[in-house]
């Protein structure tokens, strides 16, 4: 694991964006795996800057998002569809045809999930996957469980995740209880992974991910088994290492 501790979110964003920029510059058809939430926002800002400076184009880039809430439409202000468009896609030259975000409300969940996994494989697999980490060690919305999950599936969110997500919603009752997420195995299939964690609330999960046993009780701990992972932390998130 390439573990680096930075002084600011902005520096983390620059370092993470540089890995993605290198991928976009060197691959003919780069495939990015993207996360929502606070952690990747500075990275997306740096990517938008690089695009505005003419350093990179997203014309040949395909993206797959990790997850989407169930029970709210894609047009909802809190959907991950909206988040990705506001924080990245609306500001770059990516083709909407190349943007893939799981549907949170598919008619047939199983069919949708296996088609999503197939689409990732058909695109050649994910070159660089961006991840955040939950306070409970989740990656994507793979919550602590008895087994590591495989492909994309519908998951019930834990109370800790629902509580962490509350800050974005007007009322606690509006916070979705379920999501469609890529599974742990699909995440591990990525050729290169960047996990970003910021803030003291992540310190225990970061410790368990890096120093703990590889166990589905801390889903992020599986990253110890991947051979090309970057863990980018601020000082607070790294405090227990
Ligand atoms: C988001 C996702 C989640 C978040 C995690 C951290 O697409 O899959 O695993 O990365 O909950 O969220 P933030 O970055 O808001 O602390």
Image (tube, rainbow, N blue to C red):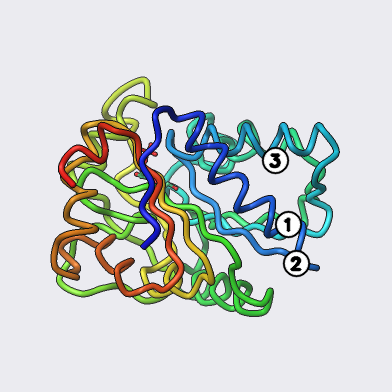
Marker count (numbered): 3
Please name the residue that numbered disc 2 is placed on: 27
Q: Which disc number belongs to residue 24?
A: 1
Residue 97 relative to residue 6: left or right: right
**Is the residue indicated by label 1 positioned so its CB lies within 8 Å of ligand 1?**
no
Task: In this rendered view, identify the residue nearer to me: 186 or 197.
Answer: 197
Mark 3 vs mark 1, foreground winner is 1
**Is the residue indicated by label 3 positioned so its CB lies within 8 Å of ligand 1?**
no
Circle 1: is it few (<14), some (14-19), or many (20+) Cα within 10 Å?
many
Quarter-wise, where is residue 88 in the image?
A: top right
SS category of the residue bearing label 1 = helix
Please name the residue that numbered disc 3 is placed on: 89
From this view, report whether residue 84 is shown above or below residue 63.
Answer: above
Q: How far, Cα to Cα, is label 1 from label 2?
A: 6 Å
Which quadrant does the N terminus fall into?
bottom left
SS category of the residue bearing label 2 = loop
From this view, report whether residue 239 is shown above or below residue 116.
Answer: above
């Amino acid at each position: 694991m390439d573990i680096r501790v930075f002084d600011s979110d902005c520096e983390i964003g620059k370092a993470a964006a540089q890995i993605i920029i290198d991928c976009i510059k060197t691959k003919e058809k780069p495939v990015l795996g993207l996360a929502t939430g606070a952690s990747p926002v500075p990275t997306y800002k740096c990517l938008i800057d690089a695009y505005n400076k003419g350093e990179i184009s997203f014309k040949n880039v395909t993206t797959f998002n990790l997850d989407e809430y169930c029970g709210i439409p894609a047009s909802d202000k809190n959907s991950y569809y909206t988040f990705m468009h506001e924080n990245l896609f609306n500001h770059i030259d990516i083709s909407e045809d190349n943007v893939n975000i799981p549907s949170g409300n598919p008619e047939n969940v199983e069919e949708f999930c296996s088609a999503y996994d197939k689409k990732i494989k058909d695109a050649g697999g994910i070159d660089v996957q961006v991840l955040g980490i939950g306070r409970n060690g989740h990656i994507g919305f793979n919550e602590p469980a008895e087994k590591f999950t495989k492909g994309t599936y519908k998951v019930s969110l834990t109370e800790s995740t629902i509580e962490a997500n509350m800050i974005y919603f007007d009322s606690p009752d509006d916070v979705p209880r379920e999501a469609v997420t890529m599974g742990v195995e699909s995440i591990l299939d990525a050729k290169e992974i960047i996990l970003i964690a910021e803030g003291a609330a992540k310190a225990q999960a970061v410790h368990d991910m890096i120093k703990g046993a590889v166990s589905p009780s801390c889903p992020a701990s599986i990253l110890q088994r991947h051979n090309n992972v970057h863990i980018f932390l601020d000082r607070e998130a790294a405090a227990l290492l």
